[in-house]
Amino acid sequence: MDLNNLTIKKFHEGLLKKEFSAVEIAESFFDFIKTKDPEIKAYLSLGKDEALSQAKKVDAALAKGQDLGILAGVPLAVKDNILIEGQPATAASKILENYQAAYDATVIKRLKSAGAVFLGKTNMDEFAMGSSTENSAFQITRNPADLERVPGGSSGGSAAAVAAGMAVAALGSDTGGSIRQPAGFCGVVGLKPTYGAVSRYGLIAMASSLDQIGPIAKTVEDAAIIFNAIKGKDDLDSTSVDLNKFQDSRFKIQDSKNLTIGLPEEYFIEGLTKEVAEAIDEAIKNLKSLGFKFKKISLPHTKYALSCYYVIMPAEASANLARYDGIRYAQIENLKLETKNLKDIYFNQRSGGFGKEIKRRIILGNFVLSSGYYDDYYLKAQKVRTLIKKDFDKAFEEADVILTPVSPTPAFKIGEKTENPLAMYLSDIFTIPVNLAGLPAVSMPVRKHQASSVKRQNELPVGFQLIGRHFRETDILETGRMYEKMING
Ligand code: GLN
């Protein structure tokens, strides 16, 4: 079985035709991970026993002639900030290295009841803060397309696992681009759902008004299958909604000539590398040949998005991270510092447990929320956030879907940006406005899915991003699906 090109759909068909069993496939994945992952380092932990017992259940159900859903037996990888009961959930932080999840996240519960198999937990930037997965406290993940380069972040482990054929698909989380940017860097598909489309219950919170869980997959079709399984109202997350209320059929996607794609002038800026600019032109040309109409649009407040994000996100993150006191989620051992009282515990655990980037953002968050600065920074950023959202509302009066690059450059070299946080922050310049506005967006490869064996020489994957109206994931997924059908044949 060619694990590299195994999609959910192919897996499902093969399983029903008895070409293989769910257990056989799960075992082949674990064997492959054993040989491949020492080089990529996508996984932080594996859940082999549970995975095999879930796969066995699927095989037994099939043998009994029961109907199997499309996700039954499908081997998935899960970012290490999403809880699976009884498994580690470190968020790639030392402060959680001994923590085991006490319950399932809602997305996990839903996927389990669909019969999915979880291979393991994937590496990420600590607490999802970063764009390269280099901020993990445990290991550096490599881009399967070029081992000298980063896989992007913060869901870099999930994207690399899918791109290297070490999982059929994966879950990631996206606060400012963490699903879309690594998907772009690794040549796979990543969907950031509308804020509220997917429950955040059981996701280790970074910035609660921006975070969303979403799929990383080999095809748009697979991403849509996972999205459909995890979406919808959940009583355990009051911000989650029933999506069906929002689907309207104002235009028929099949008739792509009715659909207008907007190109925001602010996204085609200096700093976009030649490779990315050329790839985006190619994507536009391909979509034009499918009959889509294009229109220039403007999102005038784009230039404030990054600064606005780096006020709101640290403010929320500093509040969310206050719960890690070194007591509640298991202690870090061997800190070798003397603890005489409670304050010492907090101090030692937090200073020894959090990495540099986390501390930087906690300090930033406390600063913008402190009295005297709150109005000048935090409140002002909230107002700018509203202006950014209004830009999109206006743009969607002229266009149905918006197309942009995913990031200004393809995957950069390991170590290239670690000393310069601002340069690192810039790699999310095209993804962050989407989170601020709470919109859905998918990032997908411009060129045919590049299994490592057929990859063009020296060519790094480049992705493009399709942004849709609130709760209209269908629009971008259908557009993406037409594109993918055309390039993959
Ligand atoms: N790279 C961005 C950050 O560091 C986005 C992270 C994310 O989406 N989780 O904040």
Image (cartoon, helix red, strand yellow):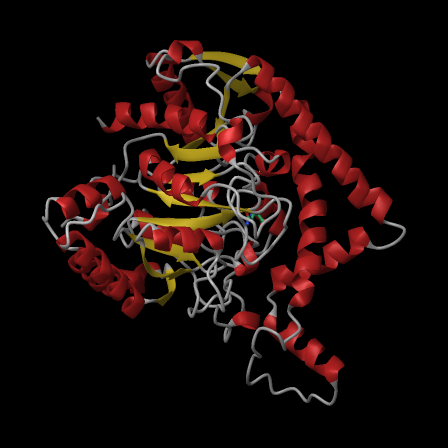
Work out whether 83 lies above or below 241.
Answer: below
Total count of labels:
0
Compare residues 326 and 314 and report the one nearer the observer: 326
Compare residues 378 and 406 and report the one nearer the observer: 378
Q: Position of residue 138 (x, y in %)?
A: 46, 68
Res 30 seen here: yes
Work out whether 457 lies above or below 330.
Answer: above
Residue 333 position by quadrant: bottom right
Q: Residue at x 33, y 24 (%)?
A: 483
Work out whether 483 lies above or below 197.
Answer: above
Q: Position of residue 11 (x, y in %)?
A: 20, 45
Q: Residue at x 40, y 25 (%)?
A: 278
Q: Position of residue 228 (x, y in %)?
A: 40, 39
Compare residues 424 and 363 and report the one nearer the observer: 363
Q: Residue at x 45, y 51 (%)?
A: 107
Q: Residue furthest right?
A: 372
**Image quarter hosting the C terminus:** top left
Image check: 237 left or right of 73? right
Q: Residue at x 27, y 51 (%)?
A: 74
Residue 456 position by quadrant: top left
Image check: 430 left or right of 394? left
Res 147 seen here: no
Compare residues 53 and 271 and report the one nearer the observer: 53
Q: Position of residue 217 (x, y in %)?
A: 34, 43
Image check: 360 left or right of 479? right
